[in-house]
Amino acid sequence: MLLTVGYVAAGGAIGSSLRYLVNMAALRLAPGFPWGTLVINILGCAIMGCLATALAMKGGQRFSPFLLTGVLGGFTTFSAFSLDAMALWERGQVQAAIVYVGASVILSLMAVLAGAALAKGVLG
């Protein structure tokens, strides 16, 4: 268990560093819109779908903590969210998938607003 946590942490450091570098490059190339985050989320989702499928098909789930949770989790948590939604959909839980996606987006936006309001109130 402790070794697995180490793999997740190492992968997270790599993914977070990559996210930072992509965001900085995007800000320099096209300031004013969060292109870096958009690209990261889309790319991360594509990689998550590809890797999760490949690992499952080839019996490589032992690499999931490092690659999926660590690297891609550090790169973008949107990829994990999308994988969860896809899994619900593929299991035939279409209504649950729709509720999950809607609730995740709306509640996450509300949480960002609430967190910002709290910080402004405390620091403000």
Image (tube, grey):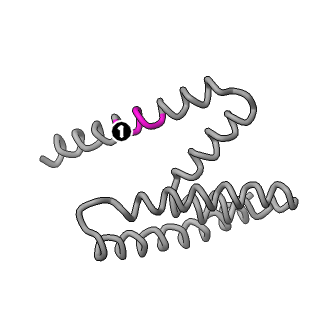
Residue 64 is drawn in which quadrant?
bottom right
Q: Quadrant of residue 93?
A: top right
Q: At 65% across and 27% down in the image, what residue appears? A: 94
**Is residue 118 rendered to the left or right of residue 54?**
left
The answer to which of 108 and 13 lies nearer the viewer is 108
Residue 12 x, y percent position in the rendering:
56, 65
Q: Is residue 94 above or below residue 61?
A: above
User: Taking 103 as reference, is 22 above or below it?
Assistant: below
Q: Position of residue 47 (x, y in %)?
A: 63, 62
Identity of the residue drawn at 49% across and 67% down: 16
Q: Quadrant of residue 62?
A: bottom right
Asked whether 39 falls inside the magenta stretch, the response is no
Outermost residue to the top: 95
Along the horizontal axis of the image, is 98 left or right of 92? Answer: left
Name the one closer to the observer, 8 or 18.
18
**Mark 1 neighbour density, 10 Å: few (under 14) some (14–19) many (20 or more):** few
Region rendered in magenta: 104-109
Q: Secondary structure at mark 1?
A: helix
Give the x, y percent position of residue 54: 78, 60
